Image (spheres, rainbow, N blue to C red):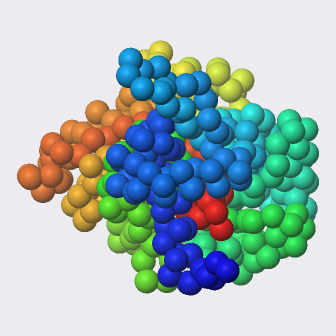
Amino acid sequence: MAKPKTANQTLVREMNASIVMDCIRLYAPLSRADLAARTGLMRSTISLIVDELIGHSFVREIHRQGSKVGRPGTLLEVNPNAGFAVGLEVGVDFLAVIVTNFVGEILWRRTQATPESQHQIAKLEQVEQVIAEALEAGKSLGLRPLGIGVGVPGLVDAEQGKLVFAPNLHWMDVPLRLIWTRRFGLPVFVENEANCACLGEYFYGNARNIENFIFLKTGVGLGGGVMIDGKLFRGANGYGGEIGHMALYKGGELCACGRHGCWETYVRPSNLYRDIILRLKDGNKSMIADLVGGDLYKITMDEVIEAAQQGDAVVLSVLEDYARHLAFGICNLINIFNPELVILGGTLSGAGQWLVPAINASMQQNVMPPLRNITRIEVSARGEDACLLGAIALVLDDILREPLG
């Protein structure tokens, strides 16, 4: 009679399975022999784990590897059809959702505008509707649902899946995981939107293989995710990384959080648009007025970029001021965290060709000398998808860490 597995044996088995799964994810295609060489695990252990991973549909065998000597080995890779995940971003004025397969390839997407003044209950109902549509879209492809990842602005208790405080949404203490787990019967992961975008870049974007970097995301406000030694910085209570609310300007403008002088009040896009409007009201001429048909309150980053590309003096001057405020905060972050990379995301990403040189110039004056030339400033490779892909990563990484759980 076989002995029952002890807790230690089960833990070792789960740890080994996670190591094998991660190795396949990073280095596939590779053989069982390759796995043994890379992980240091015994061939017999590798064979048992791989058989279980194939049984769970997380790994699949592909064409055989030719060899001059001996029997050719079967290659292994992550099975993209192991299931699908739903990634959702809840913005102040929009909802965005994607469906991906098990390797993060986007199969379906939907974006909807939402009124900034929309009541919490109405917005939650709209969110549930788009999640339901996404689940139906995934199921229609013949895949099984694996879970739902959600990125939201504000302070998030990721462990409890609760949105604690979102000043721009005017939400407080909303148990999102509880609500949607009951509604859909699937694992739900909730994370701050900028942290999600940070994860999106780490797994699918500029920051692959980079352990220390900062992601900045502008929308209605400014969010930031900080990765330290390959782990999100969360702080003592899980609310770390709210860098948009660094008080950089004594007696500065009123922020949505109720305080004055927060960094985000100077670098959110709405302030950029406001400054352009003020210049025009002072009698300056700009082509941006024609681009929006004379309605200056319809200015978006698309018009700003188009005008800048045409050399519009007003827009370029405002972008220069904007870049100075942005660089002020970034230089402080570089001095504090010593990141290898700072990524500009959200609406920032489209204006990178004007912002990055200004930030690099500011670094030469405002960053400690040893750090000036070792931090790169880059525009997000994933653009507006970074948060969505990070939400997907929450789901898939949970499975990859315990593939046999």
Residue at position x 68%, y 74% from top? 161
Residue 121 x %, y %: 88, 69
The residue at the point 47 percent across, 27 percent down is 71
Q: Is 222 on the left or on the right of 213, as rendered?
A: right
Residue 289: percent from the left, percent from the top?
62, 26
Q: Residue at x 48, y 72 (%)?
A: 12
The relative height of residue 300 versus residue 150 in the rendered view (above or below) is above
Q: Quadrant of residue 35?
A: top left
Quadrant of the rendered structure where residue 33 is? top left
Where does the N terminus fall, quadrant-wise? Answer: bottom right
| Viewer-nearest residue: 187 or 45 | 45
Q: Is residue 346 above or below residue 317?
A: below
Looking at the picture, tell me which residue is in the foreground, 185 or 183.
185
Q: Position of residue 101 (x, y in %)?
A: 70, 40
Residue depicted at 88% across the width and 59% down the height: 128
The quadrant in which the C terminus is found is bottom right
Residue 370 in view of the camera: yes
In the current view of this chain or complex, which residue is farthest to the front? 1
Q: Is residue 385 visible?
A: no
Foreground of the two, 326 or 91 = 91
Q: Residue 361, position in %: x, y?
A: 21, 39
